[in-house]
Amino acid sequence: MQKTIKATALKAYLKRNNILPSSLAMRCHISENYMSNILNAKRTNPRLPILVRMAAELDLPLHTVQELLRTSYDSLIPEKVLLESVAENHLLAYLQQILDASELNDFSMLSHLQKVISSDIPDSTHLKRYYLYWYDAYNLTSQNKFELAIQLFLEASKFVPKHEIEKRFKGKVLLGLGAAYTARGKYQQGLKAFRKSLFLWSDGYQAARVYMNLGTVYRRLTKYKLSVSAYEKAYEFGTVAIKLYSIVGLIQVALDNEDYKTARKWVIRGFRQAKTLESPRGKCDLYCNIAEYYSAIGKLNLSKGFYQRAIQVAIISGDFRTKQWAELELAKLFLRQGKEIEFETLMQTLELELSGTEDVLLVARHLNIMGKKYFEQSEYTLVISITRKAYILLKSLSPSISTELQESCRLLSEVYSALKEPKAAEFYRNEIKRHKLK
């Protein structure tokens, strides 16, 4: 026969922690009498929503509260249960700090917290292994190792969030997954991850980052109205840095559509805003797009100056990927200006840096620029050889057109037209039409 419990271990827990049952009852929106019945085992099956509220108010996992209610007042509360509760509470507190630090790109704090969690939080604690998967994936993306990062992000997302902070963390994991997919040119998978992220957490700065990434993916898929809408939401919710990145995206959309009046409006706003910021975040991308704007309207010296400024900012801030992107665009400008030596020097350096990288878009852009150089020199065999590498690489990764794939198709169409091979030229023109999303 099961022994009747006269009072629960939860009552002892409240007494030990100087928590008044009446105060807890008020916070849980139940009567003191109902709380007394729960604590004294007169209500053996409390409603689940009440237990959830109690767990949240006590900052304990739900299963711990349930265990305390099953344990008698005079019994020793299982040490393992309490240790797990304490460890889980600590990890949830660390998660809050981690999410805040990642919003600020505070890498030293992230590294410190990773060491603390690895050493101080037991391996049995819920979420620890998912956090460690996320941290490793996060670091891999900064090294352009996107395929392995994708696998780790997927592992990190395999938990069901119980608390609000866990929802936000899973949203962060899916944001990283979407960004890694995007870097590999896997836009549809990226969109799916971003949408799931917003479903879990659609407020504040983290949501602004998701919207910013959505704007970029939609732009690369030439869905310009959706892109503008996403960038505008990022601007609405974002920090000053995210607002600057959003302006960068809006400049790029205008340039893609050859709407130089709108581009100029955002260039002026972005440049004014950048001057008020001490942090370098977003400035490199902004200067790249300002340079592209000046290049598009024929002011090449101004364009060169802003590309060089972008490279300097990227070096100072350690943004290696954006530095390479700016250098590719500067090389393209050198080609346009007929500066052969400067072009060759920069492209050779980039070829070494990009060797073995998983950053498909950068590699393809490098190949397209080399193809353009040989096209201008009428070395058509080399154009086909180099540009088809970019085409095949991009076609294998993305089912839809990207600006890089569009450039490859356009260049191949032009070279086959020059070679008087109309069928091949028509094939690549049709490739653009076939995959382009309106």
Image: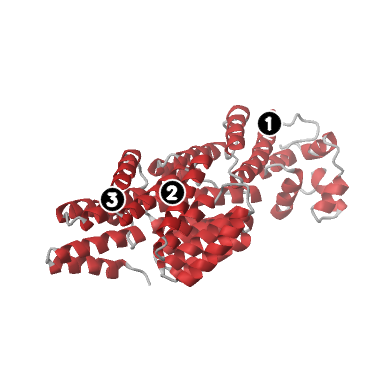
Mark-to-mark CA distance, 3 and 2: 21 Å
- Tell whether 239 sits left or right of 429: right
SS class, disc 2: helix
User: What is the residue that sits farthest to the top in this orientation?
Assistant: 119
CB contact under 8 Å: marks 1 and 3? no
Residue shown at 44% from the left, 61% from the top: 294
Question: Which x, y percent locates residue 374?
Answer: 21, 53
CB contact under 8 Å: marks 2 and 1? no
Mark-to-mark CA distance, 1 and 3: 56 Å
Q: Nearer the viewer, mark 1 or mark 3?
A: 3
N-term mark: 3 or 2: 2
Q: Residues within 10 Å of mark 1 (few under 14, many from 20)?
A: few
User: In the image, what residue type sits under mark 2?
Assistant: Ala
Question: Which x, y percent locates residue 156?
Answer: 50, 43
SS class, disc 3: helix
The quadrant holding residue 149 is top left
- Tell whether 55 sits left or right of 245: right
What's the mark number on residue 180? 2
Mark-to-mark CA distance, 2 and 1: 36 Å
User: In the image, what residue type sits under mark 3?
Assistant: Leu
SS class, disc 1: helix
N-term mark: 2 or 1: 1
What's the mark number on residue 83? 1
Return the residue at label 3: 367
On screen, 124 above or below 138? above
User: In the image, what residue type sits under mark 1?
Assistant: Leu
Q: Nearer the viewer, mark 3 or mark 2?
A: 3
